[in-house]
Image: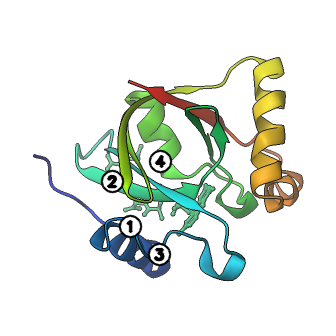
């Protein structure tokens, strides 16, 4: 089993600890928004270490949509490069943990449909896209 390297950001690391430590009973929403969050566990593409990233929960049937928004920052979050390199992940949604395969959404049509779902689940995504010139990457995680 590879070593787990927690996020360098306190609030992110603490959310992962609370969420996983309570088996998905606590820490499952984004701060006081009440909106649900999932935890994506994957491998770092350089370190090979286990990485855990909380993301907003956007569902499309049995699939999850992963949005690399990082608050509209100019650069992609690092996890985007990890998932491009290796799409094999585990997704925790409250008490359930699923093995999933992630692919980046390439077609404009599919992206438009999933982006709409994402904004419906978490409206600030729209503002984040307006804040940056990069196109925010969108991934879909499907049951492995
Ligand atoms: N971020 C989003 O982009 N979208 C969301 O919907 C979202 C929701 C959300 C909800 C709750 C919450 O607590 C956080 C949320 N975040 C959301 C923030 C998200 O969890 C990440 O913190 C954020 O996207 C930044 O991701 P990051 O991968 O850039 O993380 C940074 C801060 C980080 O900790 N990086 C590590 C580090 O040490 O700097 C990761 C390093 C890493 O993965 N290294 C790779 C390796 O091999 O191990 C190498 C990578 C390379 O290619 O260089």
Mark 3 and mark 4 lie on one chain; the one further toward the N terminus is 3
Q: Quadrant of the C terminus?
A: top left
* Crowd around label 4: few <14 · some 14–19 · many ≥20 (10 Å): some
Q: CA distance from mark 1 to mark 3?
A: 16 Å
Residue 139, percent across and down? 60, 34
Q: Is mark 2 within 8 Å of ligand 1?
A: yes
Checking the image for residue 7, the label placed there is 1
Disc number for residue 79: 4
Which residue carries the number 3 mark?
27
Q: Nearer the viewer, residue 114 or 49?
A: 114
Could you tell me how far apart the alpha carbons at marks 3 and 2 are, in whole angstroms? Answer: 18 Å
Contact between marks 2 and 1 (CB within 8 A): the answer is yes
Cα distance between the residues tagged 3 and 4: 21 Å
Q: Is residue 12 left or right of residue 90?
A: right
Q: Nearer the viewer, mark 1 or mark 3?
A: 3
Q: Are marks 1 and 3 in contact (CB under 8 Å)?
A: no
Respond yes or no on whether mark 4 lies under 8 Å from ligand 1: yes
């Amino acid at each position: 089993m590879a070593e787990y390297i927690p996020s360098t950001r306190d609030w992110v690391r603490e959310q992962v600890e609370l969420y996983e430590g309570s088996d998905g009973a606590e820490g499952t929403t984004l701060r006081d928004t009440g909106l649900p969050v999932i935890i994506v566990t994957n491998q770092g593409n350089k370190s090979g270490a286990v990485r855990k990233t909380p993301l907003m929960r956007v569902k499309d049937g049995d699939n999850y949509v992963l949005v690399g928004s990082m608050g509209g920052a100019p650069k992609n979050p690092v996890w985007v490069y990890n998932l491009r390199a290796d799409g094999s992940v585990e997704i925790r949604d409250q008490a359930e943990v699923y093995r999933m395969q992630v692919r980046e959404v390439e077609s404009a049509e599919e992206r438009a449909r999933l982006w709409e779902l994402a904004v419906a689940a978490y409206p600030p995504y729209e503002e984040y896209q307006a804040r940056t010139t990069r196109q925010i990457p969108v991934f879909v995680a499907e049951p492995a």
